[in-house]
Amino acid sequence: MSMEWAGYVAATMTTLSFVPQAAKTIRTRDTRSISLGMYVVFTAGIAMWLVYGIALHSIPMILSNIVTFVLSATILGLKLRHG
């Protein structure tokens, strides 16, 4: 039996866990309590997971990391703009 279902479940759970915080930050534009260094490293790490998923042709990794990268990059942009 293929374990790809586990990848879909993991990708969905980790991506969805990030959505409430991202939505709140995007809605309020309040980034004071967010570490710039952490978001730079986190966003770069997500980009590397995306590259790795593409190399493996792993649809769960690709889709979840695209969504997470867009959200993370948006928050990073807000942090850079609003401090």
Image (cartoon, rainbow, N blue to C red):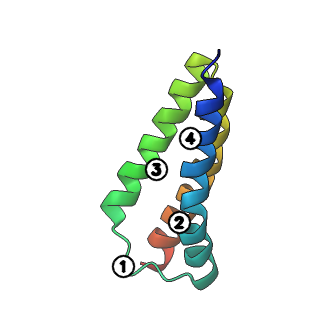
Residue furthest to the front in view is: 1
Q: Which residue is mark 1?
A: 33
Q: Which residue is mark 3?
A: 43
Dot placed on the residue nearer the N-terminal end, 2 or 1: 1
Instruction: Give the x, y percent position of residue 22.
Output: 57, 68
CA separation, marks 2 and 1? Answer: 12 Å
Dot placed on the residue nearer the N-terminal end, 2 or 4: 4
Instruction: Give the x, y percent position of residue 39.
Output: 40, 59
- Report crowding for label 4: few under 14, some 14 to 19, many 20 or more residues within 10 A (C-alpha): some
As displayed, is residue 63 above or below residue 80?
Answer: above
**Mark on residue 75?**
2
**Mark on residue 10?**
4
- Report crowding for label 3: few under 14, some 14 to 19, many 20 or more residues within 10 A (C-alpha): many
Dot placed on the residue nearer the N-terminal end, 4 or 3: 4
Dot placed on the residue nearer the N-terminal end, 1 or 3: 1
- Report crowding for label 1: few under 14, some 14 to 19, many 20 or more residues within 10 A (C-alpha): few
Please tell me whether mark 4 sits on a helix, a strand or a loop. helix
Residue 44 quadrant: top left
Q: Are marks 2 and 3 in contact (CB under 8 Å)?
A: no
Q: Quadrant of the N terminus?
A: top right
How many labels, in total? 4
